[in-house]
Amino acid sequence: MNRRIFIARSLVASLVLPFWLAGCSTFDPSAKVLPPGPRAFDFATDTLAVPLSEPGLEEKESLAGTALRGHADAHVARQFFLHARFEPAQPPPSVEARIGLVREVLRRSPTEASPEGRRVVVPGYANLREFSRLQGHLLRAESWLACPCESRVPLLTKAFVGDSGKDAAVAELLASTGINRPALVRLYRQHTLHYGRSLLVFGAQAAEGEVRFTAYDPAAPQQPVQLTFNRASRVFALSDDAVNSGTALGVDVYRR
């Protein structure tokens, strides 16, 4: 390797590594073991029905804005799975009450599920899918206020990380989905600072030579997508997007 390139990479890595260690997820087998989730994630009821782009925003919104919007929607789906309970037999709440309920769900922990007796009760709706169809504007507005801001520092550091990062992501996704804990992941192009899209991974199947993860993609809310990791080639692939698949596709498990 050219000496100047090596020095430049070492310098950048030394500058961003502390931030990466603080904000980026690496699988640690000795970390706190979370209890299993109460049930399996159901794509038909636990996802949002609203599309990413609202009418009139397609031409104004950048690709980066669309990616962050998808990340916020995946965050919302995870929060409602962990902390909400829907009671369709009860009368719907007022506008002010709906706002308060959504805010309470979004402010809770993104990693520890609420016990059944302490879940936020959302009356008048059968599930998140129905709630988002009728109150999508409310969820969208509140999610932008609650969803953590993204940092590009972790992605910059990943340009200097080898296949060990992929192994860590696969191990963490297998561990999370194995105990009914949907995992929020960000897809990115290696060696660039570009976020592609965010997924909520809720299922996994280990086949010969590969692992197949099932995920909710807010950009395609009609049906689940599949994120596959080939153990031999060490390549991630996304079932519905050939552009973002292949050797350039990286996966970052997002814990916040």
Image (cartoon, rainbow, N blue to C red):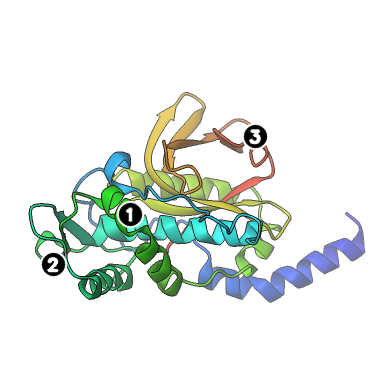
Label 3, secondary structure: give it: loop
Q: Quadrant of the image for the N terminus?
A: bottom right
Pointer 1 local density, CA inside 10 Å: few below 14, some 14–19, many at least 20: some
Q: Nearer the viewer, mark 3 or mark 1?
A: 1
Contact? badges 2 and 3 (CB < 8 Å): no
Q: Earlier in the sequence, mark 2 or mark 1?
A: 2
Residue type at numbered disc 1? Ser
Does residue 36 appear left or right of residue 197 in this picture?
left
Between 157 and 182, the residue placed more toward the observer is 182
Pointer 3 local density, CA inside 10 Å: few below 14, some 14–19, many at least 20: few
Residue type at numbered disc 2? Arg
Q: Residue at x 91, y 62 (%)?
A: 3
Q: Residue 134's quadrant in the figure?
A: bottom left
Contact? badges 2 and 1 (CB < 8 Å): no
Q: Position of residue 197 (x, y in %)?
A: 56, 51
Separation (CA) of disc 2 from disc 1: 22 Å
Asked if residue 201 is positioned above or below residue 238 in the image, the reply reads below
Between 139 and 156, the residue placed more toward the observer is 139
Asked if residue 239 is positioned above or below residue 169 in the image, the reply reads above
Residue under label 3, please give it. 242
Q: Is residue 33 visible?
A: no
Residue under label 2, please give it. 118
Q: Residue 132, which numbered label?
A: 1
Separation (CA) of disc 3 from disc 1: 29 Å
Q: Quadrant of the image for the C terminus?
A: bottom left
Pointer 2 local density, CA inside 10 Å: few below 14, some 14–19, many at least 20: few
Q: Residue at x 52, y 26 (%)?
A: 209
Q: Earlier in the sequence, mark 2 or mark 3?
A: 2
Q: Position of residue 48 (x, y in %)?
A: 36, 50
Q: Residue at x 47, y 45 (%)?
A: 217
